[in-house]
Image (cartoon, rainbow, N blue to C red):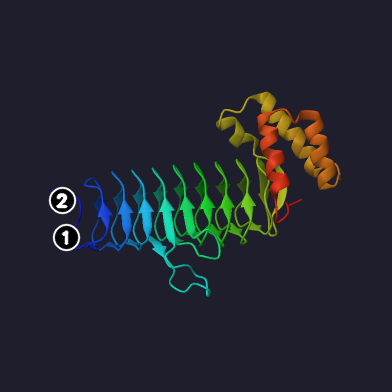
């Protein structure tokens, strides 16, 4: 039995593995590549250049690989890259990149993307993230591994959100969020560390305690950023989870929420 529904429209240049499933009325455009075991439901539109990996599940009315919503875009050959084992729910929109940046929009592996999520041009999303309904990324945003975005979270262009961070429902993110931070509000503010998330991901109690102490120095002691980072490095900078935090904070160009 064919895995491609008779009403699906497939461009002759599209490259589909023989185990790809495509539902009714979906449209697969030119320069699209789709890997083994990926399931595409009905009424999905995928435009190229787009590369989609293996064992993804893409739900109805998603639009993937459309040209970027950027007035400077003039038809350049930019692309969307999606990794493996992602769940992309109804009505999600992911745009290709622009030549003003890296020319690619990238979604990694094992991400859970709920309905109505928008990922704009030149965004990079890592692995094992969760985006709740209607989370929206402006252009050039970077989301690191294991981030959770609450429903209706809005992320301003060029922001970075660090590993294991968590935003509450309706948060408006205008600056970078450091790893391990639980933040919410409009504008978003740091509230605590994502302790429950760290426990679920196997962090040892000692590591969580160090992260909590680092968070206290960063946000609760009325230190300047440089003073806080210097003290964190002096007291616990030899530990890998703290090294990750320090590196993120020192590389921030947009500035941290504080």
Tell me residue 246's x, y (percent). Answer: 72, 39
Looking at the image, residue 33 sits to the left or right of residue 167; the answer is left
Tell me the residue at 80%/29% (across/down). Answer: 235
Tell me residue 193's x, y (percent). Answer: 68, 39
Towards the viewer: 258 or 144 = 144
Looking at the image, residue 99 sits to the left or right of residue 154; the answer is left
Residue 180 quadrant: top right
Packing grade of label 2 (10 A; few <14, some 14-19, many >=20) is: few
Callout count: 2
Tell me the residue at 19%/50% (across/down). Answer: 3
Tell me residue 166's x, y (percent). Answer: 61, 45
Packing grade of label 1 (10 A; few <14, some 14-19, many >=20) is: few
In this view, 13 is above or below 128: below
Residue identified by numbered label 2: 2
Looking at the image, residue 68 sits to the left or right of residue 159; the answer is left
Tell me the residue at 48%/62% (across/down). Answer: 97
Residue identified by numbered label 1: 6
Instruction: Give the structural element (helix, strand or loop) at label 2.
Output: loop
Tell me residue 154's x, y (percent). Answer: 59, 60
Instruction: Give the structural element (helix, strand or loop) at label 1.
Output: loop
Disc 1 and disc 2 in contact, CB within 8 angstroms:
yes
In this view, 128 is above or below 210: below
Towards the viewer: 150 or 225 = 225
Q: CA distance from mark 1 to mark 2?
A: 9 Å
Tell me the tag on residue 109.
Answer: none
Towards the viewer: 25 or 64 = 64
């Amino acid at each position: 039995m064919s895995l491609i529904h008779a009403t699906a429209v497939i461009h002759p240049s599209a490259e589909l593995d023989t185990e790809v499933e495509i539902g009714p009325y979906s449209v697969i455009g030119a320069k699209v590549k789709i890997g083994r075991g990926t399931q595409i439901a009905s009424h999905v539109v995928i435009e190229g250049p787009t590369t989609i990996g293996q064992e993804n599940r893409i739900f109805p009315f998603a639009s993937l690989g459309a040209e970027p919503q950027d007035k400077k875009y003039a038809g350049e050959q930019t692309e969307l890259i999606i990794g493996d084992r992602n769940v992309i729910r109804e009505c999600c929109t992911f745009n290709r990149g622009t030549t003003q940046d890296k020319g690619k929009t990238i979604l990694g592996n094992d991400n859970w993307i709920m309905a109505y999520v928008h990922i704009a041009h030149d965004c990079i999303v890592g692995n094992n993230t969760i985006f709740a309904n209607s989370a929206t990324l402006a252009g050039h945003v970077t989301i690191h591994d294991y981030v959770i975005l609450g429903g209706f979270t809005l992320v301003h262009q060029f922001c970075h959100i660090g590993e294991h961070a968590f935003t509450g429902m309706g948060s408006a993110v205008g600056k970078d969020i450091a790893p391990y931070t639980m933040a919410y509000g409009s504008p978003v503010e740091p509230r605590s560390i994502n302790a429950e998330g760290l426990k679920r991901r196997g962090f040892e109690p000692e590591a969580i305690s160090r992260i909590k102490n680092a968070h206290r120095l960063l946000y609760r002691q009325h230190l300047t950023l440089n003073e806080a980072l210097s003290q964190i490095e002096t007291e616990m900078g030899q530990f890998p989870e703290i090294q990750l935090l320090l590196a993120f904070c020192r590389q921030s160009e947009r500035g941290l929420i504080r």
